[in-house]
Image (spheres, helix red, strand yellow):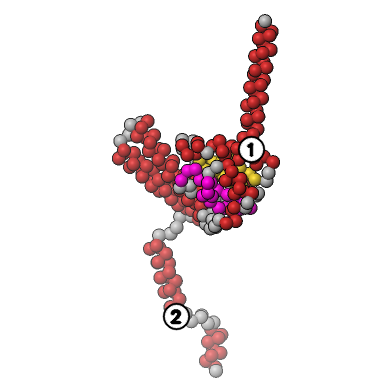
Amino acid sequence: KLRGKYHISSGINAEYGGLLLCIGLASAKVTKLTDDNRDLVLTGEWFIKAYAPWCGACKSIAASWTQLGEWSLDKEYNIAEIDITAGHNFANELLVTKIPSLFHVKNGVWTSYSGARNSDAWKKFLTGNGSEGLEPMPWYRKPGSQPMRILSYMMGFALKVQEMHERLTKQYNVPTPLSVGILILLPVIALITLFLMVVYFVHIVLGKPKPASEIGKQRARKRTLSTQPAEPADTSPAEEETKKDQ
């Protein structure tokens, strides 16, 4: 009996494990984009969903998005998604203003999708080259461009400051005005420290600069010497007698 129970349990576990494996393989086509694999979208055709885990609208299309990934398994389309709350710079560069947001990328050309949100509409969009009727993003708006990278770093810095403020006020019970003052003073102190380090390094490499008064005295001395008349050269007695005879 124990052996029979073991076989039944093993069969159930094997069947359940196989089901989970099939589900995992079926949804593996939905690529999770991060800063580490963002270069994948530079080649080929991609359909990307930007979402947040707490978003109700994002949850409502999650199953349809997985179905789209399953449908694309044997096709040239790449289905992906990115969590905008995970702190990725790539997500910041997308400059998402509403969630979920859908983006289409083909050979580096970015467009924003604003059509119906179901798997049938997405399939029709992909197979019918629907992106050709959309206006591509300008160069400065595309993720990966220099302006968007700078904006992404600024957004990331702002989020870090916000996290520090929440930690100070909630975890350490620091009053809000004091927390704001600390967060304002810290960058100022850091900049002053960096400036002093640069000045110290310049002094070591180039030497200590001379005071402006000393430089002015040296210039005045050179100017005086250049305006004085030249003294006559000394002549020997023989040369003087020769001049007299002449």
Residue 185 place in picture, x, y as percent: 36, 44
Question: Secondary structure beneath disc 1?
Answer: helix
Residue 160 in view (yes/no): yes
**Comes first in the chain, label 2 or label 1:** 1
Number of labelled discs? Answer: 2
Q: Is residue 49 magenta?
A: no
Foreground pick, 4 / 54: 4
**Is 73 on the left or on the right of 215, as rendered?**
right
Bounds of the magenta span? 98-116
Q: Is residue 105 magenta?
A: yes
In this view, the residue farthest toward the bottom is 246
**Is 224 on the left or on the right of 80, as rendered?**
left
The residue pinned by badge 1 equals 70
Q: Are marks 2 and 1 in contact (CB under 8 Å)?
A: no
Tell me the quadrant of the picture where the N terminus can be found.
top right
Foreground pick, 244 / 94: 94
